[in-house]
Amino acid sequence: MQLSSLVARLEPLLNKINSRKAQGADLSGMATNPHLQNPRKPPEQFPELSEVEVMRHYYRLAKLNYAWEDGLYPLGSCTMKYNPVINGVLAALPAFNELSPTLPAQYTQGALHIIHETEYMMATLLDMPYVTLQPAAGAHGELMGAMMIAAYFADKGETRSTILIPDSAHGTNPASATIAGFKVEKVPSTSQGLTDVIALEKLLSGDVAALMLTNPNTLGVFEENIIQIKQLLDQHGALLYMDGANLNAMVGRVSLGKMGVDLTQLNLHKTFSTPHGGGGPGQGALACSQRLAAYLPSPQISESIIDGNIVYDYYTPAKSIGRMKAFYGHFSNIVRAWAYLKTYGNQAGTIADVALLNANYLKQKLQVYLTPASQKPSMHEVVFSHKTLQERGLTTLSFAKALLDRGFYAPTIYFPLNVPGAIMVEPTETETREEMDAFVAAVADIFSHNKDQINTSPQRTFVKEIDEVAAARNPRLTWHIPST
Ligand SMILES: *Cc1c(COP(=O)(O)O)cnc(C)c1O
């Protein structure tokens, strides 16, 4: 019997295990305590199982996953890196964990200190004057930024309706700009994957509010014409928004202030030791230049000295776009980032150094098999096209599935859109040379097999054939008790 059908037989849905009415902990003796009485009625047919049944069910399911703990997770653009356990331990301390965000500032001085100091450390790393940790995630930071751009021009009495976005951008960029009320125009890339400066110049006018540029861009290449781009924007009074999701490539090594960046969002779940949520919260940050500070969302956190004591409080910036989130960020993720930055101290630049070294090492080793999308040196990630795969009758998708059979998570595929059949690999600073060599060996192994052998992949995963169209078109997003 194949492993997959064995596991499927052993691991039915919870309601199918529901043969007898079992119970986890018996709390009936405590029923007089009002805090322990559950006012909610369980739905009918709710499975009733013993604790050990429930625990084993989820443990078995968890073993079907490929997790970061299993090995290299080369998902380009996502920056899947190791998050030190100590940061999670600190975030879980009861003093943090049980703190209610509804408490007034005077009772949460410690938490406000941590948020404020994290903002300060990030501002220092970016070389920008203001950082807010209010955004819930990267895309939320983008939306805040786009709304601040709208508020800035409205305040100046200027009507500007367009935001320019390169064709290699992450899909959230045009989405954020559109939600904030802007029209989006696409800037083409050169054959080397850089923003086409001549095309940009032609698109610029008094109607352009900003350029939303990802740097390093989605090809993992540094926009080397950034100073020229900034000058062109200045000539037309347009702002420079930089998507900073790829900060892992240059944290602590590059001054965004000197690049003339007006706004940039960061993703703490990419660069600053917050786990990618698996549906749970990430955490964003938004940095801005002096001229945009008055439009920051409300509230912000101030630090002042009163009677010789440092006191933190909330304030509303003069021309604030208003509140963007019920509470200030996802606090426990801010604690993780704070601990992470404190651990690195003034050595944060080594994050970028090793991330770059690893990406370029993989590029050198993998270009024996795959064709890089750009000959420019890579920053933190490297993108290949499907050229050599097509020559062998393979697709990017079949290549990715063959990697699953060889014990690796697949890289990001078919993104960015401007590279045909893109394969995007990001090792991050976490990976050892041995792990990267094992990945290269898996790719070499794929290239040593013929197309019929590869096209039957995956064979060794729990689920083999997925109806990708149905998964995208008919997602089931609500929980229900399946009928038996
Ligand atoms: C991840 C990413 C985003 C979106 O960030 P979220 O935190 O997922 O909302 C935006 N731009 C780029 C370049 C990214 O890699």
Image (cartoon, helix red, strand yellow):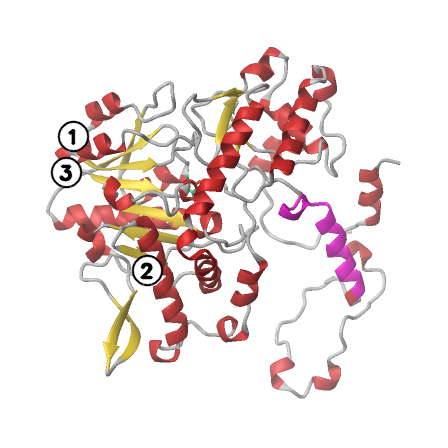
Quadrant hosting residue 394: top right
- The magenta-colored residue range is 52-70
Relative to residue 12, is residue 119 depicted above or below?
Answer: below
Q: CA distance from mark 3 to mark 1?
A: 9 Å
Q: Residue furthest top?
A: 391
Q: Which residue is mark 1?
A: 205
For label 1, being within 8 Å of ligand 1 is answered no
Relative to residue 264, is residue 449 depicted above or below?
Answer: above
Q: CA distance from mark 2 to mark 1?
A: 35 Å
Number of callouts in the render?
A: 3
The 10 Å Cα crowd at callout 3, few under 14, some 14 to 19, many 20 or more, is some
Quick check: can you spot residue 340?
A: yes
Q: Residue furthest left?
A: 157
Query: What amino acid is found at the position of numbered circle 3 in the picture?
Result: Gly
Q: Nearer the viewer, residue 179 or 170?
A: 170
Q: Is residue 53 left or right of residue 198?
A: right
Percent x, y of residue 93: 54, 71
The residue sitting at 31% across, 28% down in the picture is 186
Q: Would you say the residues marked 3 and 1 are in contact, meaning their CB atoms lie under 8 Å apart?
A: no
Q: Which residue is mark 3?
A: 237
Quick check: can you spot residue 467?
A: no
Q: Is residue 124 left or right of residue 332?
A: left
Mark 2 vs mark 3, foreground winner is 2
The residue sitting at 76% across, 30% down in the picture is 459
Mark 2 vs mark 1, foreground winner is 2
Image quarter where ligand 1 lies: top left
Q: Earlier in the sequence, mark 2 or mark 1?
A: 2
